[in-house]
Image: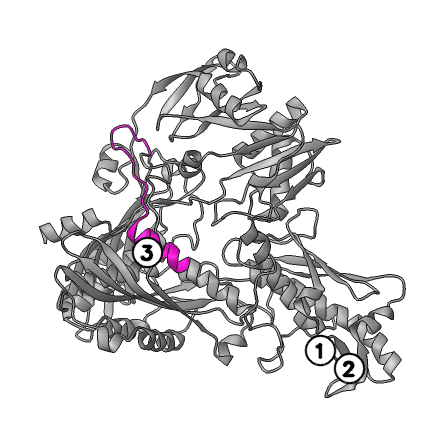
Amino acid sequence: MADTKYDWPSAEEASLIGKSHDRLDGLAKSTGAAEYTYDVNLENQLIVRALGCPHAHCRVLSIDTSQAEKVPGVVHVHLMRAPTTDEDGNRVAPEIECQGELIAAVAAETEAAAAEGVQRLKVDYELLDAFVKDDDVQAAEAAGRASPGPGRVQLEREPDDDVEDIEAFEAAEIERLLGDSAYVVEGQYGVEAITHCCLEPHGTTLQWKDKRLDAHLSTQNVSRTDDGFAEALGITADDVDVRCEYIGGGFGSKFAPDAWGIAAAEIARQTGRPVKFMLTRDQELKIGGNRPSGFVRVRLGADENGIVRVWDSQQWGTGGYGRGGVTDRVVPYVYEPKNVRRSSTMIKTNFAPQRAWRAPNHPQGCAMSQTAYDDLAAKMAADSYDIFRKNLENISSGQTADVYADQMKIAAELMDWKNLWHPHGKGSRQGSVADGLGMALHTWGGTANSSTCLLKIHPDGGVESYCGTQDLGTGTRTVCALVLAETLGLPVEAVRVHIGSSTYPFSGASGGSTTVGAVSESHRRAGQDALAKLLPLAANKLDVDAAQLVARNGRIHVDGDPSRGMTWKEACRLLELRPLELTASYRRGDKSPLSNEGVGGVQMAHVTVDTATGVVRVKKLVAVQDMGLIINRKTAESQVYGAVIMAIAYALFEQRIGDPDSGAFVNAELADYRLPRIGDIGQIVVHLHEPQEQRARGVIGLGEPPVISGGAAISNAVCNALGVRIPVLPLTPKRVLDTLRNA
């Protein structure tokens, strides 16, 4: 409503937001009652299994389905990448560019029959050269797999007007600055590609009802995947209902129906039966999404105080056969000297195309940049903390240097940095075990996405909200309920939240840490708009000015005098027979007092390294994070814990391994794709940084930022322990031992 002043209650006035609350769906999830897409089984449904291409690079010459069709229980064989004929009558064999790409799908009465049908498919392939060595830029260039990527040069000193060769001037200026530097660091750093590895694989269970598609889809984009289905199937979005009550992991890879979702709908339409089509585990790892690799050669120059004045880097990596890779915009990361030259090379490999992975590009950029700053500290025999603090004068971030400085102080106290710190490689050892400290900083946007809330307040006092958002496990349902309960002065359990359907009012995808801000915006606005209509009715009954009334503790009463009022239910009876219904919306990018963007964080790691076995263990990791105003402290802390665990995973364990000869993804099963166990995690200490000036900014997204700097912090801690840099993440025992052997 145009005349409503939207705002948040002060920390002193707030009764619910900012406190710790259990998830509303916590019991359902922990007991197994929550129904995920994988759990949905429809009457008379068919089970689909698909043939993933066994080769990393080939052409499909022919597909013989005859034997598959004879398997008892097989109902339908659906071709996904079969040869076609062009307009001139020529046979066109589709090119497959990664192992696992789906070629054909078999629908059957049982999973076993579908699997046997897949085994009976006979496919003729023409093998082509495969390339997967994304860490070797020279090999990529020799194989014709490298292409120039974006780059940028910025210098304090501008060339004179008569300078014709700008590139030569820039190169000479970079060399001059490096030559004038008191300290120069040269190094090579990198981060391997990893997969999404969602606990619940990608997929859908769906059926057609009277020419309408009803799809249970494991998605982080409920409100827009109906468009994806509709466009591919030749129908309109209002003929599609996408549902996702619960999702078992979605970190940026589940925004679309994907080829398998469209295939499921086509099979269901052709057979007239419901269909369940979920990827197998190896297919999930191969084609369900991956985070691109990044490697970099760096030269930096610093003055006598350790402040970096010049940065020169060349980076490369792969986003699969779609090229891509880590963007040059995140190198250097957070810290950005006034003189920077950076270039990039994109490498095309025979892996599936990259997809957004929690804080896209930022974890790699941090690990490719702030390791060099730590190496500067090592070269100066300085405390890394001091070098990181001094360089706050040159940052490019959504957060301020003062906030980072405060967060560094807090993290250092929680880590006991001053007492534990030792110069690189100079700490005492217990036998073969050395310990070390490392730190890193990060930034993120976290703006609120677009969102609309339909709010219904019933004459009996019941409150319901409808919003086409989704809960990735972050506690979105609970946030919606908390915001409305706080606004209407009710207990959380008095609010019924409906999410997870594309038939509900639109809300943006859960990506970029935008969801909590989005639903907080729409639900707070809806709640305040509802009070703007309800309070005048109560005021008329109480014979007071509506501006004097507040909604608190299940009552509507005069502010400061709870006795002059009525219960919530009594107030709702004034609605008479019709419920109060209204919608409230927020559009992404609009300036608002309820939400904001731009956060920062600091993470510090204390590790041990066994120089005899190469095993790295995290003893303690401290994460300090701001996010503006906190809605639910418990789920906010949970977000940070989960992100830190993911950082430990990619820092020490996770990597996609490709066979250099065949291009095969050799560890595409959970038995081989190493993830951390409970004993690998160590102590995690979370501090949510919410001083009043940050709280006053409103809600800012939290999902992505705490996953960013943990990898770099752990790498720096290992370097501090050993005195030598293990240049590429993950820091596997083999890499540790190889580096020590060659040091």
Residue 535, by quadrant, is: bottom right
Q: Does the CB distance between marks 2 and 1 fall below 8 Å?
A: yes
Say which residue label 3 marks: 679
**Residue 247: % across, % down:** 55, 47
Relative placement, left or right, of 497 versus 369 is right
Is 646 magenta? The answer is yes
The residue located at (84%, 80%) in the rendering is 539
Q: Which one is earlier in the sequence, the residue at label 1 or at label 3?
A: 1
Relative placement, left or right, of 363 versus 36 is left
Q: How is the image coloured?
A: one colour
Q: Residue furthest left?
A: 742
Element at label 2: strand
Is 355 situated above or below 152? above
Residue 108, by quadrant, is: top right
**Residue 466: % across, % down:** 70, 56
**Residue 117: % across, % down:** 50, 19
Which amino acid lies under the numbered mark 2 shown in the image of this protein? His
Say which residue label 2 marks: 557
Magenta-drawn segment: 643-665
The foreground one among 468 and 48 is 48
The residue located at (43%, 34%) in the rendering is 283
Is 173 situated above or below 314? below
Which amino acid lies under the numbered mark 3 shown in the image of this protein? Gly
Element at label 3: helix
**Residue 691: % across, % down:** 48, 79
Q: Residues within 10 Å of mark 1 (few under 14, many from 20)?
A: many
Q: Does the CB distance between marks 1 and 3 fall below 8 Å?
A: no
Is 458 magenta? The answer is no
Which amino acid lies under the numbered mark 1 shown in the image of this protein? Arg
Is 636 situated above or below 689? above
* Between marks 3 and 2 in the image, the one whose residue lies nearer the viewer: 3
Is 644 situated above or below 555? above
